[in-house]
Image (tube, helix red, strand yellow):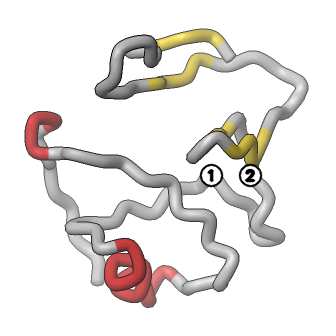
Amino acid sequence: MQFAATHPLNKIRRVQIYNNIKRYRETELDKILQETGGSFVSGGPIFLSDLSACCHLKGDGVVYGAPDYHVWGMAWGRRAGLCHGVAAL
């Protein structure tokens, strides 16, 4: 299941970082969609083969990766008090 698509931001209600502890392969992305109830899935090189994060990564309040260097990152949210925009991590 591989294809490219563009999704308008106003059509995206939620973004989830899926920590693939079940070690689904790239050919099994449909299983992640079934498990999460998502509409689309995008693979990304944010985890190493040992399942550790290869970059700064935080999801659902859990820090998966905090390497000792600074990069630019993105944050977003709908509720007041959450960060919107780009920040140096």
Q: Is residue 80 visible?
A: yes
Which residue is the site of mark 2?
Answer: 53
Mark 1: amino acid: Ile
Q: Which numbered dot is residue 25?
A: none
Q: Residues within 10 Å of mark 1 (few under 14, many from 20)?
A: some
Q: In the rendering, at what x and y percent does residue 36 appear?
A: 38, 73
Residue placed most toward the observer, 85 or 83: 83
Of the 4 image quadrants, the one containing the C terminus is top right
Q: Is residue 85 visible?
A: no
Q: Residues within 10 Å of mark 2 (few under 14, many from 20)?
A: some
Residue at the (43%, 53%) spot, across then down: 16
Question: Contact (CB < 8 A) between labels 1 and 2?
Answer: yes
Quarter assignment of residue 63? top right
Q: 87 above or below 51? A: above
Task: Say how many tags the image has.
Answer: 2
Residue at the (44%, 12%) spot, across then down: 81
Quarter assignment of residue 68? top right
Mark 2: amino acid: Ala
Q: In the rendering, at what x and y percent does residue 71 appear?
A: 67, 19
Name which of mark 1 and mark 2 comes first in the sequence.
Answer: 1
Residue at the (62%, 72%) spot, across then down: 20
Q: In the rendering, at what x and y percent does residue 43 appear?
A: 45, 63
Which residue is the site of mark 1?
Answer: 46
Task: Find the residue positioned furthest to the right.
Answer: 68
Secondary structure under tag 2 reads: loop
